[in-house]
Amino acid sequence: MKTLVIGGGGFVGSAIVRQLVDKGAEVGVLGRNHYPHLEKLDVRQFQGDILDSDYLIRSMQGYDTVFHVAAKAGIWGPKHEFEQVNVAGTRNVLGACFAAGVETLVYTSTPSVVFDRKDLNGADETTSYARRFLCYYASSKAVAEQMVLVANSEVLKTCAIRPHLVWGPGDPHLIPRLVERGRRGKLKIVGNGTNLVDISYVDNVAHAHVLAAKNLNSSATAAGNAYFISQGEPVNLWNWINELFGRLGIEPVRKKIGYGTAYAVGTLLEGIYMWFSMEKEPKMTRFLAEQLARSHWFSIDRARRDLGYKPLVSTSAGLERVVEWLSARQK
């Protein structure tokens, strides 16, 4: 398998690259920068932009499988930036795959495409896309995912992977943000604190991507489908955060704020930030209030059945690795 990982220099992308190299695949990485941490893996690096169709086509020559992991993530920012990267960029990737003769495409999506302001307890892939999105990231990823799945054909087989709350050593977003706010005492439990959520250790997420590519290149029973990916068992969000904090010597989160209050604050802050064209992310948004207060966990039965997926790293083992990583960073 000759694979090109678009966005292979990022957190999830790098994990996919490592697993592909371990399996003996010939790997190329396309990203906006050159990534020194990938040099020791002896992978070919292409430096370019997914908005450059011609460059995409040239870079894909000779590759049979593409992983499209690149995206503009986040819960705040101008709509056009999310649509440009996540929608127009994905359209370019699809066009380049067809032009370059790529046979399979695995797309990295998100469960946020179905999050519709209500609790999701064991939801599966029959759950409809959300009707109203509270952030441009989710809406743009929903459009992009649908484009990828509709493009599935005998010429280009496609599928989408939906990992939820990806974490692990090297995490540049979730864990560092939680730890930073925890050390400053800036976190509050939103709602009653009983909500269950899915989390996904990064190596498990990469494993699911590799399994999806293997399927598309053989039986292709995954073609045209989306797959939720997680640890296979939800956690109480606040208990999990406090367990991490306890291991790091950080005071547990005890203060609470009602969901309605948090939502109202998020609405107000969004209005202020939009009015003054502020680029910095508000401390609270409507989407964040929903995510922190609601349950959102998903069935991975389809991934188990079609892909043979099961988590390689347990939640407890993953926590050990994260604590070791964070402790090493402080030395």
Image: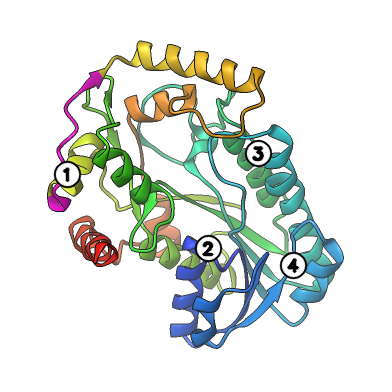
Q: How crowded is mark 4: few (under 14 residues within 10 Å), some or many (20 or more)?
A: some
Q: How crowded is mark 3: few (under 14 residues within 10 Å), some or many (20 or more)?
A: many
Q: In which quarter of the image is the C terminus?
A: bottom left
Q: What residue is at 32 percent from the left and 30 percent from the top?
A: 295
The residue under label 1 is: 250
Where are the magenta residues, as a range? 247-256
Q: Which mark is residue 10?
A: 2
- Tell me which numbered mark, 1 or 3, is placed earlier along the sequence: 3
Q: Which mark is residue 48?
A: 4
Given the image, on which type of amino acid does mark 3 rest?
Ser
Q: x, y percentage for residue 115?
A: 48, 31
In the structure shown, which secondary structural element does the residue marked by tag 2 occupy?
Answer: loop
Q: Residues within 10 Å of mark 2 (few under 14, many from 20)?
A: some
- Tell me which numbered mark, 1 or 2, is placed earlier along the sequence: 2
Q: Which of 49 and 6 is in front in this view?
A: 49
Q: Residue 69 carries which label?
A: none
Given the image, on which type of amino acid does mark 2 rest?
Gly
The residue under label 3 is: 140
Instruction: Report, in whole angstroms, how far the alpha carbon at label 3 lies from the one at label 2.
Output: 19 Å
Point out the frontmost of discs 1 and 4: 1
